[in-house]
Amino acid sequence: MKQQLVKYRAMFVGCMLALVAVPALALDPFSVYRAKAPTDCLDAKIGEEAIDLIQLIQIGICNNPTLSRSYMSVKESEASYGASRSSYLPDITASAGLNASHQREQGEHGRQEEPYEANVALSWLMYDFGGRSAQVDQMKAYLDAAQFTYNATLRDTVLSITTAYFDLLSAEEVLKSARTSEASFKKSYEESVRRFELGLVSASDQLLAKTTYEQSRLTVVQAENAVKQNAGVLAVLLNLPPDTPFTLAPPPKDRDITQLETDMTVSEMMEVALTARPEMQSKRSTLLAAEKAIDIARSEGLPSVSATARAGYDDAWKHRTNYQLSSSIGVSLSIPIFMGFSNTYNVSAARFRYNQAALDLAATADDIRNQVWSAYQNYQTAISSYAITQKALESAVENERVAFASYQIGQESILNLLTAGSQLATARTDVIVAFYGVLTSKSTLYRAIGRF
């Protein structure tokens, strides 16, 4: 009998440990974990081979810390949604007790007892006037909102990488232009020295040419710094050290990539954005969650019906004492009578939060319309600016060529030559900045529309 009791006690302890261990298992009985981490990540040798924009985006999607945090928020919402669905299942709890006591009366031998007991209780909510289903719907709406927010963060990440890519390419080309201008001003300076030594010009020509040449060298130094700064910005977006060297592949030249691939009017773009933007979809899901919160708050003041069951085992652990088994089953009705008006205020608070969510949705819609309008106007301005700078560059190239030839034969002053050179340097830089400005504003417009 003693061995049998020891066996029962071991079984009991094993059952308790099993019940404690079950919640720790990585289970997904409701199949809520559906969001997957980004795959097909690119493992490119940055700095050793030319990388285009698509490859940079592939690296950034997998490495960007902001995007990773947003993904973890989705996973958290999935877990909360699974927890809410568990309310449809019964709650089972187990309890156990084991104690030892020793009693001794005068003139008698001591008496020692080691009683123990085990109980299992079940409670199953059967009906609560929609509160439970509203909570599940609310968690599902929050999950949808988190997924849409992740989608928006993904698009922001892509736009940030795209902008950094264009900025770095622009800075690199501006540096090349600055070095070209430096070489041109050096040539003008050397020509002024030659003409001064021949006695054809005064010393002021030579000094003015030298000053302009030194200023062009300063422009090169500043352009080199701009390249380093923009490379650092791109590296941080990819979660790489700021000193990471980049070798970028330029955008394709086989077509005019400055033009939009759509003929929609700006009004049509705004209407598309209100449907396609994940920010709007996230706000709509948040509004639905706020609506369900009203139902949850209202149900807390209504009755609920639950099924209950209990089983127990009690043993004093003495041969002369029989063990006891007990069980019960029933249905319980809980009716809240008075909760200090808290339920009334909770329902009102839920309604106010719903109104806030509705106003937030309307404000987001207004903001998106303004974003599309502003991005569209910026794009149109960028296109016009690019066309103007191209014409200005053509004129500046011809003007500098004529001015240098005229200076060589003494028909032009050094001041006119340097002015023509400065205008050419500015025109080259303006074309580069305008071209990549068009590409950046085009990407920003697509992001504003929601079709990025």
Image: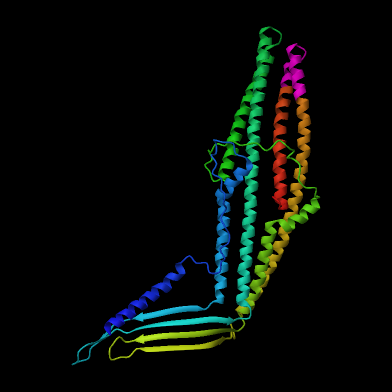
**In the figure, residue 148 lies in which quadrant?**
bottom right
Query: How many numbered marks does the figure carry?
Result: 0
Image spot of residue 388 (x, y percent): 78, 34
**In the figure, residue 337 lies in which quadrant?**
bottom right
Q: Residue furthest left?
A: 107
Q: Residue furthest top?
A: 198
Q: Is residue 228 above or below residue 99?
A: above
Is residue 404 located in the magenta-colored stretch of the structure?
A: yes
Does the image show residue 285? yes
Q: Give the quarter of the figure containing the N terminus.
A: bottom left
Q: Is residue 440 left or right of residue 17?
A: right
Residue at (51, 85) in percent of width and height: 308
Depth check, front residue: 7 or 249 = 7
Does the image show residue 353? no
Q: Is residue 273 above or below residue 91?
A: above
**In the figure, residue 7 lies in which quadrant?**
bottom left
Q: Main secondary structure of the magenta part?
A: helix
Q: Residue furthest bottom?
A: 107
Is residue 195 located in the magenta-colored stretch of the structure?
A: no
Depth check, front residue: 349 or 430 = 430
Region in magenta: 397-418
Image spot of residue 397 (x, y percent): 75, 24
Q: Is residue 277 above or below residue 285?
A: above
Image spot of residue 236 (x, y percent): 56, 44
Image spot of residue 199 (x, y percent): 69, 7
Residue at (47, 88) in percent of width and height: 328
Residue at (71, 29) in percent of width and height: 428
Depth check, front residue: 44 or 209 = 44
Q: Is residue 373 left or right of residue 286?
A: right
